[in-house]
Amino acid sequence: MAKNFDPYRRHPWHGLSAGPCPPEVVHAYIEITPFDLVKYELDKESGYLRVDRPQYTSSQPPMLYGFVPQTYCGARVQRLMPGATRGDQDPLDICVLSERPISRAEVVLNARIVGGLSMLDSGEADDKIIAVLEKDPVWGSATDLDDVPRSLVDRLRHYFLTYKLVPDAPTQVSIDEVYGAEHARRVTEAAMQDYREEFGHVA
């Protein structure tokens, strides 16, 4: 048996590090791909993906979607979003651009943070970090949101404004700001600090 081999599956949220060089380059654990019409979400107890619900609308996520391990949206993340009453108490969400289709979830990849969406969901700070796949032949050189076509950012914004829509029910979601890499790194660092305060350890 190889040295340092862990015979047990690590919990994706708690057992993986935030990344090789956070908050610039982070690990992204992918829950949903652009091909999914069902919303999957990490089961926090077991660490496996759970079916949350079929998507209510016909729109599909335009990018890979998951979270940054060892992050938590608590008080520090909340303070960075005007109007938020608290963080959403989940790991920090991340959307990743990849030129080649990645069609399976439950993969881990390195992602360079380039920006984010300031999303308020029922009063909770629920930032959506935007990143590019590290070493991607098309997107890998991007360092800020200006390097990503505005149409892709608009498509992502529209997805998150509509993916929870239910007929005849008011929406509780708003996105008041689209921000660049500097603020996105600040949100990521805040989420890492919130995690350390909440859980008290770093792998």
Image (cartoon, helix red, strand yellow):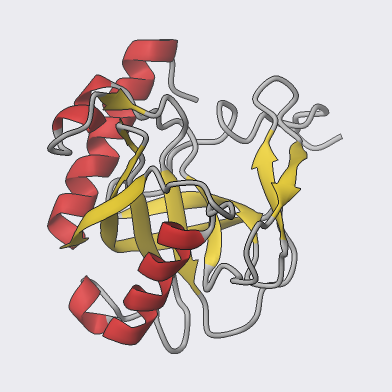
Q: Is residue 133 visible?
A: no
**Total marks placed:** 0
At 71% from the left edge and 65% from the top edge, which residue is drawn? 36
Q: From this viewpoint, is residue 38 visible?
A: yes
Q: Is residue 201 above or below residue 102?
A: above
Q: From the viewer's perspective, is residue 54 above or below residue 152?
A: above
Which corner quadrant of the image does residue 105 belong to? Answer: bottom right
Decide: is 142 above or below 18: below
Left or right of 48 in this view: 111: left
Q: Quadrant of the N terminus?
A: top right
Q: Which residue corresponds to the image point at 41% horizontal and 40% vertical from the top-left?
A: 92
> What residue is shown at x 65% (from left), y 80% (from top)?
101
Q: Residue 63: where, in percent of width, then height?
A: 52, 70
Name the residue at the front extreme.
168
Q: Position of residue 7 (x, y in %)?
A: 83, 28
Q: Nearer the viewer, residue 48 or 155?
A: 155
Residue farthest along the right direction in this orientation: 1
Residue 122 is situated, as x and y percent measured from the top left of the image, at 37, 34
**Percent from the top left, x then y, of residue 146?**
19, 79
User: Position of 148 compared to 53: left or right?
Assistant: left
Task: State the residue in front, 75 or 173.
Answer: 173
Find residue 176 and report its image quarter. bottom left
In this view of the protein, which residue sits in the foreground, 97 or 51?
Answer: 51
**Residue at coordinates 76% horizontally, 38% vertically from top-left?**
50
Relative to residue 7, is residue 158 drawn left or right?
left
